[in-house]
Image (cartoon, rainbow, N blue to C red):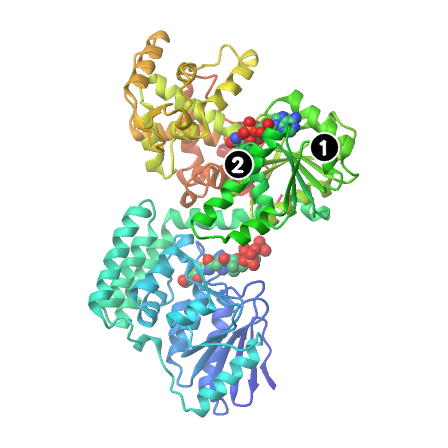
Amino acid sequence: MIPVTPSDVIKRELHGRVLVVRIDNPPVNALSARVRNELQLAFEAAEADATVDAVLLIGAGRAFAGGADIREFGKLPKPPALPDVCNQIEACGKPVVAAIHGVALGGGLELALAAHYRIAVSGAKFGLPEVTLGLLPGSGGTQRAPRLVGAKAALDLMLSGRHIGAKDAHALGLIDEIASTDDVLADGLAYTQRLLAAHAPARRTRDARALADRTSSRAAIEAARADAAKKTRHLFSPMKIVDAVQAALEMSFDDGLRHERQLFLQCLDSPQRAGLVHAFFAEREVQKAPETRKAKPRAITNVGVIGGGTMGAGIAVALLDAGLPVTMIERDDASLLRGGALVEKVYDRLVEKGRMSLEEKADVLARLSGSTSYDALDKADLVIEAVFEDMAVKKAVFAELDRVCKRGAVLATNTSYLDIDAIAASISRPADVVGLHFFSPANVMKLLEVVVPSKASADVIATAFDLAKKLRKVPVRAGVCDGFIGNRVLAIYRAAADHMMEDGASPYQIDRAVRDFGFPMGPFQVSDLAGGDIGWATRKRRAATRDPKMRYVQIADRICERGWFGQKTGRGFYLYAEGGRTGQPDPEVEAIIMDERQRAGITPRTFSDDEIMRRYMAAMINEGANVVHEGIALRPLDVDVTFVHGYGFPRHRGGPMKYADTVGLANVLADIREFAKDDPLFWKPSPLIVDLVERGATLASLNQSA
Ligand code: 3HC
Ligand code: NAI
């Protein structure tokens, strides 16, 4: 083995007559400008060197390659472009083999497709996830993948962005061999030697014939087009992917590549790409809360959950799914039985759908135990409380926890609004208390607000972040205030929606406008789903402290007074057919709204969808900025992640703070000032927005690691 050139990111070693070209750009071998440049040099050298018979392309460290360097998007492109590097590799006169371990994603897989042969270790993962970043595979992937595995399979990979394993990749024809060991270099070299011994030619993917059946290829393309129009109507890149595959079918390879490039550049320029890339980095950035750098997490092997209602049961499922043993505490046997049944129901559905066997279900449930006595928590390392949203009840529970839990146990509350500092202050160990605010359904929703009370110790917070990782949740650090980040901002934009409803927009128009913007549901549908009684109880609790000068819309109260709490009672803002989940507009609700307008002395006016969204978003952005300004959220990106993962904010817009920068913070401020002319108490510009606009700065400028 002779090292050929010293280089940081591309290592070249001659093994006999095989040149091993190793990408070494940690952590995931992203194909940065330097990597591309040196890859080019390596292949030029291989071509020119008479002592080289073949090239073996591999990745160092944990992956083959995680794709193009996402950090370069949006900056001035630096040559050489990845498609050119791929073309050069494919054109190489000597056989080129890619040996894959870890991941080959996006440009990483496209690089492998440009090689002449592919072998992978059995644990390798493959995917073309560009669609999740608002892009399409832009280094020949849309042209090579369909030629290699057919239009249907290639479209499925590109439109879903999913990762597949080596076995599936082999079955599709994406790779030629699965290695017999995990030694990617040894198996790659052995495979290359076999190819050389068999005088295998430089086989080029551009010549592959999987599109030969034009009728079925065309059918697959049309089916994908119809599907994309239906399922991803808000997204820009899925249709471009379909267009690119159509080009693969109808054009020469070189023309197809040129077409792919044009489509790729359109995607690259789109605000959706910017939004999705922002979301990608933001959800990684939120994991790095300051406490996670300062302190080590405590060990968590035993967990307790107090309360087996909607949230307690869902949290128990999330913990069980992460492999942890769970002890559930309820106030009496009947409630305990009901809590256990709620947990079991989740697994029953998985069994029904064939996603879990009965034995697996039994194994999981064997880790769940229950008790009506707090003494069962004496071994717990972490307890999560999810009892009624009532300070007295919560304090009583924490007093019990203080009594029975061992020293060092983390004591968490799932409260939505209550003052966690007050809960912490009520026991003898406030440093162990933290808020773990899950979202419903707790075993499904990705967001976990980690609410940090003033006395919490750093290792308790680090433990919360560590737990989030185990639960595969996206944690966002939040400070203590009424509603933390998410529910606090929600209260404001929901109020803006209520104001518009009273001023003349129907709840159905508002919901539709919000859906057209990209949310899966509008605010009134959300209320019907969650249960109108929850918000009603909160409003009643706050009635005494509400500023009487502040506008208060009573429509929701009138609806709740009739016992119309939404889906669970068959009507709310919408009417639901027996057991139905899709509501119909309700003329009686419209009549209630008219009466309320009259009572409030309001002459209704019309709203355009555009005005609805400007008001809705301005309210969300303004309160989001307040939350950052007050240090409740560390940075704007924490607000973005909260809304994308907890409130259905369209990911392709990056989050409300990213959206504000996209439309221009000065425009948002101008809107707020315009709206303030009618209601200055509600529309108070956030000092943070005023300051940023005065300085000509963006919210993104505050996104450096906190
Ligand atoms: N470019 C730049 N940085 C990347 C990157 C990429 N393609 N992929 C990952 N990273 C960075 C992450 O930001 C993170 O940085 P940090 O430590 O500073 O926060 C670090 O690498 C590790 O990433 P993860 O924390 O996500 O590590 P995991 O082991 O959990 O996951 C992964 C690794 C599966 C590779 C995951 O990072 C991933 O899915 N990456 C994106 C893959 C992708 O979408 N590739 C396509 C890019 S677009 C493209 O190739 C266009 C082409 O067609 C022209
Ligand atoms: P729920 O009413 O469905 O469940 C509460 C459960 O706690 C009941 O089963 C009750 O029997 C039990 N309980 C009451 N007092 C108890 C005690 N002293 N000891 C043991 N068990 C006791 O309520 P839900 O919706 O699950 O809410 C629980 C908490 O989670 C609340 O603080 C709520 O604000 C919060 N939350 C609720 C969300 C939701 O969407 N429902 C979302 C996020 C947080």
Q: Nearer the viewer, mark 2 or mark 1?
A: 1
Local secondary structure at mark 2: loop
Does label 2 or label 1 sit earlier along the sequence? 1
Amino acid type of the residue that numbered disc 2 sits on in the rendered structure: Phe
Q: Quadrant of residue 218?
A: bottom left
Q: Residues within 10 Å of mark 2 (few under 14, many from 20)?
A: many
Total labels drawn = 2
- Dot 2 beta carbon under 8 Å from ligand 2: yes
- Dot 1 beta carbon under 8 Å from ligand 2: no
- The disc at residue 193 is none
Residue at image x 47%, y 25%? 492
- Whether residue 382 sits left or right of residue 364 in the image: it is right
- Whether residue 204 sits left or right of residue 700 in the image: it is left
Contact (Cβ within 8 Å) of mark 2 with mark 1: no
- The disc at residue 374 is 1
Q: Position of residue 461 (x, y in %)?
A: 68, 41
State the residue in front, 378 or 289. Answer: 378
Q: Position of residue 176 (x, y in %)?
A: 42, 77
Rounded to the nearest whole Å, what is the CA distance between mark 2 and mark 1? 25 Å
Local secondary structure at mark 1: helix
Above or below, 86 relative to 673: below
Say which quadrant the C terminus sits in. top right
Q: Position of residue 607 (x, y in %)?
A: 30, 24
